Image: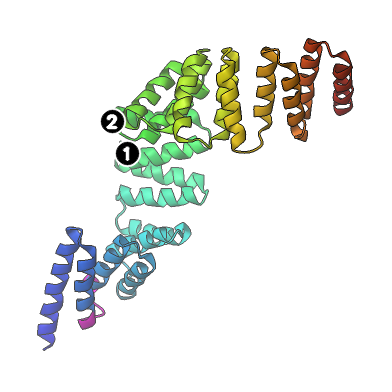
Amino acid sequence: MPGISKKTVIDLSKKGSRLFRSGQYEEAKVIYLEAYEIDQENPYVLSGLGDVYRKLCRFEESGKYYDAVLMLDQNNVFALRGAGDARRGLQFPEQAIPFWLRYLEINSNDSHVMVRVADAFHKMGEEKDAISFYEQALAVSKDDPFSLLGLGNVYYANHEDDKALVCFEKLIEGNSQNVVVMTMAGNIYRRRKEYDRAIEHYKRALELEPDNSFALFGMGDCFRGHLDLEQAVFWWDQILQREPDNQALWTRVGDALVNLDRMDDAVYHYESSLKAGYDLYAYLGLARAEHKRENYDKAKEYCQQALKDEKGAERALESLIQICEAAGDTASADEAKKKLASLTS
């Protein structure tokens, strides 16, 4: 009888493994549980259940089965790696790391697990340790895309643009189709005011994801840097078609349109911003637009609205002074000057 049970467990374990490899996780779970009823200490069955529950995103149950394997064999590499993965799934990187480090003591050249350790350290804000493990992974696998991406992300987050760019450009040269990488590389060049190089990267990103808001925004900002505001508006408006609640961008585009003397379009954008709620800069923009159109009374009203925000009082008063002087209303201009002097004294 024991022999029959053992053979049955082996057969069930093999069947569960086949189902798992073909992506039939629920079916594999049923088979592994059947085997588990027969033998609750079989490491293949326990690891199989850990794998299945991990794939089903039931990480707490997954970890329980990996831990059961480790109670029997503390150096089981499959369980060590899986136990770490289960804790990562539970959003406990600090608990995952010790399992993966024990795994690496046995499999010291597994760059994939090194990257997992590095990712976990990065998530915990332990940047030095994260960089160390990404570099260890790259020492094993020179152009590993996951290592380059992770390392680049750490440098990017820390504003170490030169180092981040080395990683991102290697990924792009390796024909990476990662839109995020292209966009981050574009952002670095844009911050450096190397607008043409930035535009190249944003264009590549948009070829893959035409609606990517980060790349569209970057394109617009590059053209603003080139003083081509018509093109800037063209790219930014594509974002607004899909993000009607993007208040800051409605105002930004409104400002560009005022500079282009497209006052009706500017007013429409400022008013669209205000539909999302109070916006100091939209009111200041409306005041500027109406000032340019010599609608002084309207412009004054918008300045009064802007004055409701204490943070913007100085700018609102400066605008109000200019408008009143242009309208020939010296009394109101002098009154605004007194208020401004009291704020700046």
Give residue 20's quadrant in the image. Answer: bottom left
Q: Residue at x 26, y 72 (%)?
A: 46
Left or right, 269 with reference to 117: right
Residue 237 image position (x, y, % from top left): 47, 26
Give residue 72's quadrant in the image. Answer: bottom left
Provide the residue designation for mark 1: 145
Residue 298 image position (x, y, % from top left): 72, 22
Residue 240 image position (x, y, % from top left): 48, 31
Query: With respect to residue 161, does 66 lie above or below?
Result: below
Give residue 264's quadrant in the image. Answer: top right
Considering every residue shown, the one lying at the far bottom of the view is 1
Query: With respect to residue 35, does 201 lie above or below?
Result: above
- Residues drawn in magenta: 37-44
* Magenta-colored stretch includes residue 125: no
Q: What amino acid is at disc 1?
A: Pro
Mark 1, other Cα within 10 Å: few <14 / some 14–19 / many ≥20: some
Specify the quadrant that holds the C terminus. Answer: top right
Q: Which mark is residue 174?
A: 2
Q: Residue at x 34, y 75 (%)?
A: 71
Q: Residue at x 89, y 16 (%)?
A: 331
Earlier residue among tags 1 and 2: 1
Nearer the observer, 270 or 204 = 270
| Tag 1–tag 2 contact (CB < 8 Å) | yes
Nearer the observer, 271 or 83 = 271
